[in-house]
Amino acid sequence: MKLQVMYFAWLRERIGQGSEQVETDAATVAELVAELRTREARYDLAFSDLSAVRVAIDQELTDLDASLDGAREVAFFPPMTGG
């Protein structure tokens, strides 16, 4: 499946781009992250501490075990802070 994958804040800085089209066979967000980490060192670094990464599928907050079935977009970002 093709997904639009978006990266925000320090994830974008470490990976070097804000978004990309990804062709994947991953069934869950965790599997997608595992695939991305094998691409290059910059992806591995960006996803090295998953406790500091939040995820949304089609603009709905979810977790790493979430299914990608029917997903069009996955966004990765650091935890949000209030203010």
Image (cartoon, rainbow, N blue to C red):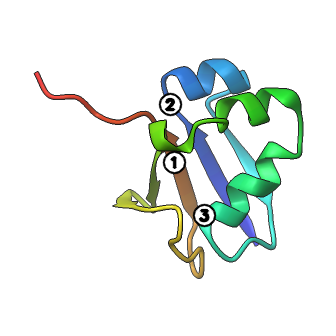
Residue sitting nearer the eye, 58 or 39: 39
The outermost residue toward the bottom is 69
**Mark toward the start of the polypeptide (3 vs 1):** 3
10 Å neighbourhood of mark 1: few (<14), some, or many (≥20)? Answer: some
Q: Position of residue 25 (x, y in %)?
A: 81, 73
- Looking at the image, residue 43 sits to the left or right of residue 56; the answer is right
Q: Which residue is mark 1?
A: 75
Residue type indicated by callout 1: Ala
Q: Is residue 7 above or below residue 4?
A: above
Q: Position of residue 29 (x, y in %)?
A: 60, 63
Q: Which residue is mark 2?
A: 8
Residue type indicated by callout 2: Phe
Figure quadrant of the N terminus: bottom right
Residue positioned 72% across, 28% down in the render: 45
Residue sitting nearer the eye, 19 or 10: 10
Figure quadrant of the C terminus: top left
Corner quadrant of residue 30: bottom right
10 Å neighbourhood of mark 3: few (<14), some, or many (≥20)? Answer: many
Residue positioned 53% across, 70% down in the render: 65
Q: Is residue 15 above or below residue 79?
A: above
